[in-house]
Amino acid sequence: AGISKVIQSSFEIAWVLESQLSDYQINSELSQVNLRAGTGEFFPIHSSLKEILIVAMQAENLTQGALNVKVGRLVQAWRKTRKDKILPDEKELRKIALAIQGKCIEFSNDSTKLRLANRACQLDLGSLGKGFVAQKVLDHLVQNAWPCALVDAGGKICMTSLDKIGGEWSVGLEIPGGTAISDQMLKLKNCSIASSGKTYQQVQIGDQVYSHVLDPRTGMALTHGRSATAIAADGILADWLATAATVMTLQEIKKLLVKLPDVRLLVWEINAGKMN
């Protein structure tokens, strides 16, 4: 009975966070904030939305805009493209991309309310939300006397040790460009791991394949064959770092890693069918 109650409450935490942070649910806090963008009206929020946005703004600064959660309108445009197979207007995308470079996220004086100063800004937490939720659920399990656990939120994984004697979990990575699993398993514990790339949710138009991952600085979906896996102490950091590493140049990534010494990052480039 004890473990079933903790598991049930863990799922409830995930459901509550989704009701606050999802851009798919019209009544979520995030969607209600988006609806009021540019009107000057504040909307009441829970601490979780504030917490994730503070991390997101720090990540935007660290990555010089390669990670940006104000990409909601761009994400919507590319979702339509994946459905209709018609490319969005590139000039309009660049216009939105330019508009979201500024600071439009504003908290009330007591930090209990939020507004978006610019109508072009629409929040989308797809670049770090799952890692955030996975970490919150893992923390809940540990706090409720389950010190050995692993939480998987859509491929964003947070874990303690495998057992009380410090055993390591075996984690397999998909080989970029397909769904095959590498035969070299990673041995991990007390960390988080996340991957990003264009294996899933991609669309082909003509001879070009477009990823679901966008470059917020241009508004364009990625077309290169880049995949990245990040390992970090915290779920949200692993999630946004993996996303950003698919967007940034290798030179930019090297500069970023100097600022993040306690992470590991695996980056694959697929050029002319060959993986590096």
Image (tube, rainbow, N blue to C red):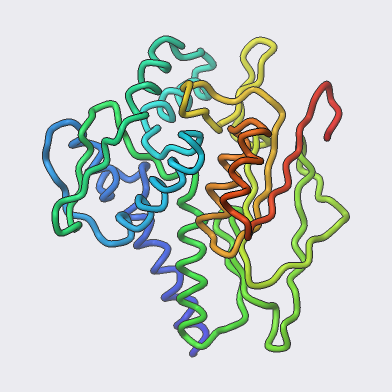
The residue lying toward the viewer, choosing from 115 and 77, is 115
- In this rendering, position of residue 29 left or right of residue 208: left
The quadrant of the rendering that contains the C terminus is top right
As rendered, which of 220 and 149 lies closer to the eye?
220
Q: Residue at x 75, y 62 (%)?
A: 171
- Whether 226 is drawn above or below 80: the answer is below
Of 151 and 83, nearer the camera is 151
Front residue of 235 and 27: 235
Instruction: List x then y, in percent, for residue 232.
Output: 61, 60
Residue at 39%, 68% (x, y): give it: 13
Please state the total of marks drawn on the protein image. 0
The image quadrant of residue 162 is bottom right
Classify residue 161 as left or right of residue 113: right
How far from the left and from the top, in percent, is residue 45?
22, 55
In the image, taking residue 25 as reference, residue 250 lies left or right, namely: right
199 relative to 8, above or below: above
Q: Residue at the spot x=48%, y=35% of the render?
A: 64
| Image position, residue 27 (x, y; %) | 25, 47
Relative vertical location of residue 209 with respect to residue 256 in this rendering, above or below: above
Specify whether 162 is left or right of 114: right
Residue 230: percent from left, percent from top: 65, 51
Compared with 3, 237 (above or below) is above
